[in-house]
Every structure is written in structure tokens, then in C-alpha cells.
Image: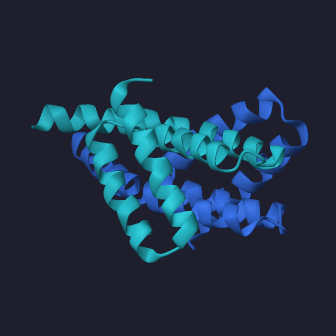
Chain colours: A blue, B cyan
Amino acid sequence: MDDILKLDAETYKELMKRYMETRDEQSLYEVEQASKSFIQNNILPDEIVNMHIQALEELYPSLSEDIQYSMNFLLEAMIAYGIAHQEYQTLREKQS
Amino acid sequence: MDDILKLDAETYKELMKRYMETRDEQSLYEVEQASKSFIQNNILPDEIVNMHIQALEELYPSLSEDIQYSMNFLLEAMIAYGIAHQEYQTLREKQS
């Protein structure tokens, strides 16, 4: 994993941890802001789902197998969106 | 919810149900294919996460509160990607 992705995965996990403790709107707002910076760092939507799976496994080591499998399923559903997002980045670069 | 989104949510749930029962590669391949058709139907990545939450709640009514909250967090993280995806659709339409 490259450095930016690793840093973003850490940020994601910390924000999620805080949200799970507080369950407040402020933490949700923070992830919305972080999400914009993930996009600027060229993090793809399927990588977000991957960071989510990692964070879940680290914060909830006893996560049920069903949930783990369901998250793999979501990851697979998001891969085509990752490819579309890469095309979007390319189109934007051409425009600028 | 419009008709296409409703139909896609049903497809997503059925594919996930099958995958959770079989846990085989074939079902993962099917969601990968379905995912391409979701994109063609202008379904946004955050709507995929929403369909995932709905499917989880329907297939696992006793889903823990922690998992429900964590999925809301992921949904929030995906909203900026939804906006980016809409821009991508607009850019592509301009090109065609």
C-alpha cells in the first residue's frame, strides 16, 4: 500500500472510531470533509470500501463471518465504480 | 425511489443473498457484471452503499447497532464520490 493510502486508511479508521464512540453529526461531517481529500489524493471508491473493511476488522475483531462476506460482496460491486472514477480523473486532467 | 433504482436494489439483494448462501466466485462475478449495469442505469456509488445497507437489514434483521452505524459512516464517506460520479457522467455526455 502506498503512503497516502496508508495515511488515509489510518484517518478513516480514527474518524470511524470516534463516530462509533460519539455517534454524533460532527464526526459524520468530518468524514464528509475527509472524503473530499481522499478524492484529491486519488483514492478510488473501492479503496474506501477496502479501508472500511480494514477499520471494521481492527475495531471489531469478533466481526461475524456473514458481515465479512457481505463486505467482500460490496467491494466487488464497487470495483466497476473504481474504474469509472479513474476514467473521470483522466477526463478531468485532459480538461485542465 | 424511482423504478430502476428499486429494481436494482432488488437485484442487489438477490445476488447478495445467493452469495451469502453459496459464498462462491460465480456470485461475485455476477455482482461485478450487475455493477456495470448499475452504472449504465445511472446508479451512483453512494446508492450502492444504500442498497447494501437495505439488503443487510432485510437479510439480517438482527444486525447489531454497531454495524448499522458503521454503514451510515461508510455512506457518508461515499457521498462525495457520488457527486464526482455525477460530474463524470456529465463529462462523458459532453464527449459523446
Instruction: Name the foreground residue: A11 vs B42.
Output: B42
Q: Quadrant of residue B8?
A: top left
Would you place residue A30 above or below residue A55 in this image?
above
Instruction: Name the foreground residue: A27 vs A94.
Output: A27
Instruction: Name the foreground residue: B5 vs B47.
Output: B5
At a point 46% along the width and 62% down the height, the residue shown is A76
- Left or right relative to A16: residue A82: left
Count numbered badges in the picture. 0
Name the residue furthest top. Answer: B1
At a point 60% along the width and 68% down the height, the residue shown is A3
- Percent of width and height locating residue A81: 39, 51
- Percent of width and height locating residue B34: 34, 54
- Left or right relative to A34: residue B9: left
Would you place residue B37 above or below residue A25 in this image?
below
- Left or right relative to B86: residue A8: right
At a point 61% along the width and 40% down the height, the residue shown is B75
- Percent of width and height locating residue A54: 69, 65
- Percent of width and height locating residue A42: 46, 54
At a point 27% along the width and 36% down the height, the residue shown is B89
Instruction: Name the foreground residue: B61 vs B53.
Output: B61
